[in-house]
Image: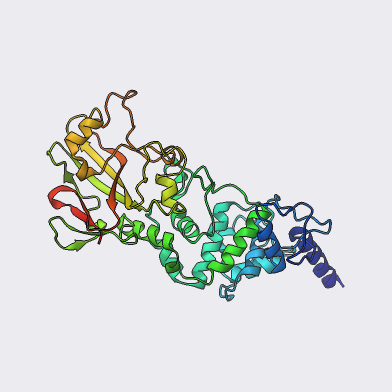
């Protein structure tokens, strides 16, 4: 009798936590009007049995999701085999979520050892970065190539504001890159990822449907993830974007990694610089994560990317001139634009994402680039999408970029 009571009690709590209303795809909830941004996702997630509504006819779309709730949801949506050995999470034993959390552990989403010491804390609201860790862990169990994708992107440029402004742990670069590159998770309009923000039931409904699709695909199916992987491995996404490189004066075909971090002289021998990263952006692909980071539709004050027949080239330099470069005219004279790709440009992305760049005006500064001090900045140039146009950088030991 006690055993039956325990099962009934667990079922009751499970119903209260994730909902009890057995709705169909056509069901309507009093608090989810047709105009709600997640209406379709909510209806679909309910019809597939991932979520349920509540007995009072509501869905509570703005309610936060706890760790145990998300674990149960991932166990439901996942097609993973149960391969991991069970780890007892003492503070889950006897709770409504025990079976679902145990399944989430077995399917590879939750690393039980992570919570073995301090407890799983099942009622704690789950954060966005924790969700990412769980989902990508599940993908890695499903397809080992996702483990390689995580490794490849550990040194990439993560296209979120926290990458430069702080607030993102380096250990999460890979998993967040996979989540962004596959579309599992998105950043916000201000460029932030908000890793420590909690997530609502409406947001999770949309995420579950995305995961349902991603789990049956491979990392190679996602172009933006391929870009981030190439950047992580070589410093540039140029080959993914269709740009080739070779030693100058039409030499051996190479990639950006061959010149990355190597010291080059300015053309006039008045300083040195290194090239750290090269990000290629197609102005026609406004949904691109790097378009949003470097260009942005709003407040594009220097009209970057107006010529749709060009690829945009954003290069991270570390420059150390022997004499102070006081303004943009001197920047051209001393460094030679074609070898450092630095047109004047200004976009809202510079402010939103916080990456280093040269100011448009030196009115507030005595100099553009100080002498004998290494200065990092993202420069901007372009290359034609076709026609064999080439751009050289790095002097005698550098590369030519070209398109065909």
Tell me, what colour scheme is on the image?
rainbow
Question: Relative to the observer, which residue lies in front, 268 or 376?
Answer: 268
Residue 322 spot, x, y in % from top left: 17, 33
Q: Total marks drawn? A: 0
Residue 118: % across, % down: 61, 55
- x 57%, y 65%: residue: 211
Left or right placement of residue 140 versus residue 67 in this view: left
Taking depth in this image into account, of 215 and 347 the one nearest to the observer is 347
**Is 308 above or below relative to 371?**
below
Q: Please identify the quarter of the rendering in which residue 116 is found.
A: bottom right
Q: Is residue 114 visible?
A: yes
At a point 18% along the width and 48% down the height, the residue shown is: 394
Q: Is residue 126 above or below residue 49?
A: above
- Quarter of the rendering occupied by the N terminus: bottom right
Image location of residue 174, percent across then percent down? 44, 58
Q: Quadrant of the C terminus?
A: bottom left
Question: In the image, is residue 358 above or below residue 155?
Answer: above
Q: Is residue 112 visible?
A: no
Residue at the spot 28% in from the left edge and 39% down from the top edge = 343
- Furthest-right residue in this view: 1
Residue 360 relative to residue 88: left or right: left
Instruction: Give how far across and how far down residue 197 sits, in percent.
Output: 59, 47
**Left or right for 23, reference 214:** right
| Residue 349 lies in quadrant | top left
């Amino acid at each position: 009798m006690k055993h039956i009571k325990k099962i009934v009690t667990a079922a009751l709590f499970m119903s209260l936590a994730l909902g009890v209303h057995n709705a169909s795809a056509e069901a309507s909830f009093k608090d989810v009007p047709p105009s709600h941004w997640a209406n379709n996702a909510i209806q679909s997630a309910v019809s597939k049995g991932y979520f349920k509504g509540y007995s009072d006819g509501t869905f509570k779309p703005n309610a936060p999701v706890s760790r145990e709730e998300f674990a149960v949801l991932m166990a439901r949506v996942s097609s993973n085999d149960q391969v991991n050995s069970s780890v007892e999470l003492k503070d889950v034993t006897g709770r409504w979520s025990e079976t679902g959390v145990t399944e989430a552990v077995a399917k590879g989403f939750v690393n039980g050892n992570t919570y073995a010491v301090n407890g799983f804390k099942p009622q704690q609201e789950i954060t966005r970065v924790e969700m990412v860790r769980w989902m990508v862990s599940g993908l890695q169990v499903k397809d080992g190539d996702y483990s390689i994708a995580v490794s490849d992107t550990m040194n990439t440029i993560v296209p979120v504001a926290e990458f430069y402004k702080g607030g993102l742990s380096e250990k999460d670069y890979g998993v967040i890159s996979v989540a962004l590159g596959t579309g599992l998770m998105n950043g916000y309009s201000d460029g932030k990822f908000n890793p420590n923000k909690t997530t609502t039931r409406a947001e999770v409904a949309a995420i579950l449907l995305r995961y349902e699709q991603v789990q049956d695909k491979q990392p190679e199916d996602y172009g933006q993830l391929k870009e981030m992987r190439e950047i992580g491995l070589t410093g540039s996404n140029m080959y993914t974007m269709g740009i080739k490189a070779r030693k100058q004066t039409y030499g051996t075909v190479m990639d950006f990694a061959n010149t990355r971090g190597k010291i080059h002289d300015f053309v006039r021998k008045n300083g040195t610089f290194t090239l750290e990263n090269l990000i290629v952006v197609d102005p026609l692909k406004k949904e691109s994560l790097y378009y949003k980071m470097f260009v942005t539709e709003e407040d594009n004050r220097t009209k970057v990317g107006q010529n749709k027949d060009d690829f945009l080239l954003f290069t991270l330099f570390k420059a150390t001139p022997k004499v102070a470069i006081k303004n943009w005219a001197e920047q051209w004279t001393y460094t030679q634009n074609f070898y450092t790709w630095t047109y004047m440009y200004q976009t809202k992305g510079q402010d939103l994402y916080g990456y280093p760049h040269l100011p448009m005006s030196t009115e507030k500064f005595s100099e553009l680039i100080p002498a004998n001090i290494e200065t990092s900045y993202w420069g901007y140039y372009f290359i034609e999408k076709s026609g064999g146009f080439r751009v050289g950088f790095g002097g005698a030991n550098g590369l030519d970029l070209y398109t065909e």
